[in-house]
Amino acid sequence: DHRDRILNPRRRTAAQPSCASGASGLDAQDLRRALQDRLVVMHYQPKVSLQTGTVHGFEALARWPHPDLGMVPPGVFIPLAEREGLIRELTLALIASCFEESAYWRRSSAMHADPKMAINLSPLLLGDHGLVDEIGSLVQQHGLQSGQIILEITEGSLAPNMATALATLARLRLKGFGLSIDDYGTGFSSMQQLAQCPFTELKIDRSFVCGAHERPNLRVILKSAIDMARQLELSTVGEGIESMEDWETLRAMGCAIGQGYLIAKPMPGAEVPGWLQAWQTGANSSLKQAALS
Ligand code: C2E
Ligand code: MG
Ligand code: MG
Ligand code: MG
């Protein structure tokens, strides 16, 4: 039915028109209005140390709570924003709201350490020369440091404009931002990109993480990715940790950081201080104990 189609973008047909309303039923006008009314928001998913359970930071993930359609996932509206030339405006608005919220947590008592904030960047924006300065001034406006921010770029998406993308990434890195290769293992020119780009973090795609303990082939790939990252002096993150076995498999292989439903699902910003409090004071200690025993 209608709702199901919207929430399952993979079922959309190739014949979808690019400027009129697509099979999702959502069009550029809907998105423009949502942007104007600041309806698209960030949710936040924790990243924790697999060795100690300490909170390393959060990844900001965009959500569009729609009055008729429920929670529209980013897999639907990010491609729409990219097609319709709205991705720059959407990204800067989301970054601003994310910085506002995280500055607020920092002042709240639950926040002991200094968590990193990870933000996903559309590869289309890597061709945009003004973007680096705009993100830089947002960081300043909110009293943050660029070293607290990690920008995640999906592996394999850089290829079309490699030279421009490289220049933008280099400028971001010079400014002190962390740079993460997202969904590592799903792209094509991975080795080339790894050698050329100034990345600081390798984020292994959840298809290699989830259920790895019972799939020897996945374990081999996982282990070699983690070893390679260590030798390149990249921080390693495993995404999609859904079970204790996933956590333990990654930890035993030396992966530093983990993220996944086992630890927490993405949550609204207002829930973050409470979650932190609970995690740090041990309300989730059965999970941490089991993981670290
Ligand atoms: P991603 O950056 O790889 O984000 C991880 C995705 O995996 C998120 O889906 C998250 O909710 C989901 N996830 C986390 N832990 C688990 C788990 O244990 N099991 C399973 N099955 N899934 C898990 P989400 O939020 O639907 O985001 C999908 C993608 O949309 C993201 O993939 C990212 O590439 C993109 N995206 C999200 N927010 C933004 C944004 O603000 N800007 C841009 N350009 N892209 C975004
Ligand atoms: Mg990501
Ligand atoms: Mg990812
Ligand atoms: Mg992913």
Image: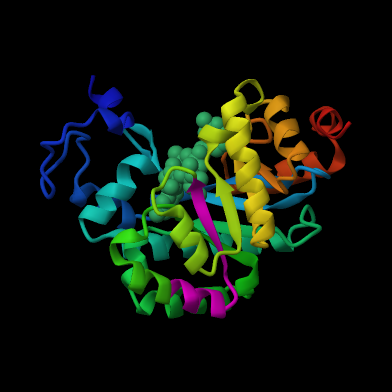
Vertical relation: 217 (above or below) 27: above
Query: Which is more toward the observer, 259 or 282?
Result: 259
Residue 144 visible, this orientation? no
Instruction: Indicate the position of residue 21 as horizontal and vertical percent values.
Output: 14, 42
Q: In the rendered structure, does residue 160 fall within the stretch colored magenta?
A: no
Q: Nearer the viewer, residue 152 or 263?
A: 152
Q: How many marks?
A: 0
Q: Position of residue 277 (x, y in %)?
A: 79, 44
Q: Residue at x 20, y 51 (%)?
A: 28
Q: Quadrant of residue 67?
A: top left
Does residue 39 appear to the left or right of 148 in the view shown? left
Residue 94 appears anywhere in the view: yes
Judge left or right: residue 183 versus residue 112. left
Quarter of the N terminus within the rendering: top left
Of all residues shown, which one is farthest toward the right?
293
Q: Is residue 193 left or right of residue 112?
A: left
Q: Position of residue 127 (x, y in %)?
A: 32, 71
Q: What residue range appears in magenta?
A: 168-184
**Vertical placement of residue 215 versus 72, above or below:** above
Q: Nearer the viewer, residue 199 or 14?
A: 199
Q: Quadrant of the C terminus?
A: top right
- Between 263 and 28, the one lying in front of the other is 263
Coloration of the structure image:
rainbow
Instruction: Determine whether, in the image, residue 202 is placed left or right of residue 183.
Output: right
Residue 42 higher or lower than 173, as above or below: above
Residue at x 57%, y 71% (from the top left corner): 177
Please say if 164 is above or below 56. below
Residue shown at 57%/31% (left/top)? Answer: 218
Judge whether residue 182 is colored magenta: yes
- The image quadrant that residue 77 belongs to is top left
The percent position of residue 174, horizontal first and vertical second, equals 55, 80
Residue shown at 57%/57% (left/top)?
118
